Each structure stands twice: as C-alpha cells, then as structure tokens.
Image (cartoon, grey):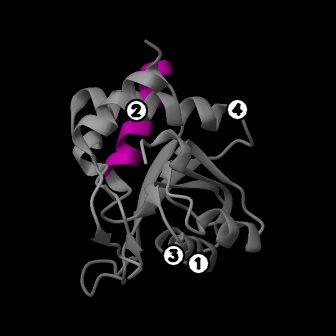
Amino acid sequence: MSARDELLKLILEVSFEKRPVTLTSGRKSDFYLDLRQTLMRPRGARLAGLLALEKLLGGPPVAAVGGMAVGAVPFVSAILLAAAERDPETELLGFFVRKEAKQHGLGRRIEGGFEAGQSVALVEDTTTTGGSTLEAADAVEAEGGKVARVLCLVDRGEGAREAFAERGLDLEAIYTRADLPL
C-alpha cells in the first residue's frame, strides 16, 4: 500500500465522520473531519510529514513551514521530522502564528524559526474557507516574510482554493473532497 493510500485509510478510520456539523467558519457541513486525531498518532504524523515534504520538495524552495496555532502545530512538527529523517543537516525551520501577540516575554505573534525576509510555506491540516491560513499569511507578511506556498492535508473544497487564488497563491492539497467517501 502506498503512503498516500495508507494515510487516507487512517484518516477515514480515526478522523472522518459522515454527520452534520457546524464548522469554525459557521458553515454547515454533512461531514466532520478532525485531523488532529490522525496527526497525533505516530503513523499518521510520519505519513503526513513524508507526503507533505515530498510536495514541498517538488516546488519553489522555502526556508520555513508554519501556520496558525494550534491546528498547524502537529503538521509542522511532522514535516520537520520528515525533513530531518531525510537529511539530518536540513535547514528547514518551523514556526507558528498566534491569534494575538503575547502580552509578556518578547510579545511575539510568530514563534519559532521565522525571520523577516524568509520565503515560507503555510500549512494547515484542513482547509474550508482558508480564513485561518490567510490570517497567518497576513501576520507573516506584516513581519516581512513572503508566503511562497500553501499546503493542506485535506481541502474540503468549500472556497479555500479560490480565496488563496485571490491572493496569488495556489493551494496544494494532499487530499481533496473527492478522496472522501461522501
């Protein structure tokens, strides 16, 4: 079984439910997808990291991968581990974007391996409208970074691709709605 097929099988076993749900965006959906259930399992993290890294290596280079806390954190970690497994000397960095800057310490909104001038990939486990990743893009750009890539594990097919296109970004998805048993 390919890594892609194996990960999809795991997603369908532990992260997918065909039932009505209200999404973060307020939209109604006839299926629920909680990819933290997949990404917080060793096999899920390993497979997701490998598949995402494979996509990232096949396009414009980036210095770092990141996304909105809390959702992107396990995915970022999985990608970094896959990168280190492939090349122990990798210079790929990871970061996450807070909803708001901390009110203590250094008061950062972006934490981790992020610096102004970097070209980055933003990642998200599931995209619906793309709102949280667009918010992360705004934060990265406000701090002097350039969003070169946007990658998700599953694109629900509910407007994210179009929202990113309006910003001149292509959404790269490992899986789409068509891969789900709807």
Rendered view: 158 above or below 87: below
- The residue that label 2 is drawn on is 8
Q: Amino acid at mark 1?
A: Asp
Give how far apart the Cα atoms at labels 1 and 4 are.
25 Å
Give how far apart the Cα atoms at labels 3 and 4 are.
25 Å
Which secondary structure lies at badge 2? helix
- The residue that label 4 is drawn on is 58
Q: Which mark is residue 138?
A: 1
Pick the front one: 13 or 167: 13
Residue 2 lies in the magenta stretch = no
Residue density around tag 1, few if under 14, some if 14–19, many if 20 or more, within 10 Å = some
Pick the front one: 156 or 36: 156
Residue 177 in view here? yes
First-in-chain label (1 vs 4) = 4
- The residue that label 3 is drawn on is 131
The stretch in magenta equals 74-87
Mark in the foreground, 4 or 2: 2
Residues tagged 2 and 3 counted as in contact (Cβ below 8 A): no
Residue density around tag 3, few if under 14, some if 14–19, many if 20 or more, within 10 Å = some
Residue density around tag 4, few if under 14, some if 14–19, many if 20 or more, within 10 Å = few
Q: Amino acid at mark 4?
A: Gly
Q: Amino acid at mark 3?
A: Gly
Residue 84 lies in the magenta stretch = yes
First-in-chain label (2 vs 1) = 2
